[in-house]
Image (tube, rainbow, N blue to C red):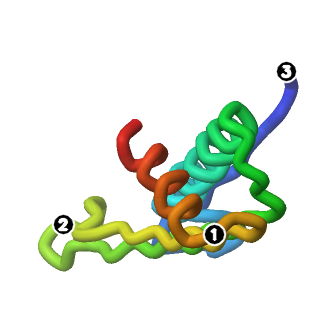
Amino acid sequence: MGRHFVLDSPTGPNEALTNGEAFLAGISSCGVTLIEKHAQETGVPVKRMEVTIEGARRLDAPNRFQSVSMRFTIAGVDQAQAERLVETYRER
């Protein structure tokens, strides 16, 4: 296709996303896509969605994540609907 995606090493030269940042971006993007598709299929009126993702690296193995946390903010739905949508993502 002729497309290029540049990733940077965590040690530099700090000109692009690092591998870990790209990994987290992919996971959060996948979450948004899955939730949007499920909402559309089930008629849940999602108007807007934001996801925040954070990853903590292990000190003894910096190439591994100790933890990853995601927070979804979903507009256009009530709390119960939002929780069901996020649970759909967690189950997949």
| Residue drawn at 61 percent across, 68 percent down | 51
In the depicted structure, whether residue 51 falls above or below residue 40: below
Choose mark 2 or mark 1, whichever is in front.
Answer: 1
What residue would you read off at disc 2? 61
Amino acid on which the number 3 mark rests in the picture:
Met
The label on residue 16 is none
Q: Earlier in the sequence, mark 3 or mark 1?
A: 3
In the depicted structure, whether residue 48 falls above or below residue 54: above
Residue 88 placement (x, y as % from top left): 46, 44
| Residue drawn at 63 percent across, 69 percent down | 78
What residue would you read off at disc 3? 1
Measure how far apart labels 3 and 1 are at the Cα level.
Answer: 41 Å
Q: Residues within 10 Å of mark 2 (few under 14, many from 20)?
A: few
Identify the element where label 3 is drawn.
loop
Pick the residue in front: 18 or 78: 78
Identify the element where label 1 is drawn.
loop
Residue 81 placement (x, y as % from top left): 57, 59
Report the quarter where the C terminus lies.
Answer: top left
The label on residue 78 is 1
- Is residue 23 shown to the viewer in this render? no
Residue 90 placement (x, y as % from top left): 39, 49
Q: Residues within 10 Å of mark 1 (few under 14, many from 20)?
A: few
In the depicted structure, whether residue 71 falls above or below residue 49: below
Along the horizontal axis of the image, is 32 left or right of 12? right
Amino acid on which the number 1 mark rests in the picture:
Asp
Q: Tags 3 and 1 in contact by the CB under 8 Å rule? A: no
Q: Tags 2 and 1 in contact by the CB under 8 Å rule? A: no
Q: Earlier in the sequence, mark 3 or mark 2?
A: 3
Amino acid on which the number 2 mark rests in the picture:
Ala
Along the horizontal axis of the image, is 86 left or right of 73? left
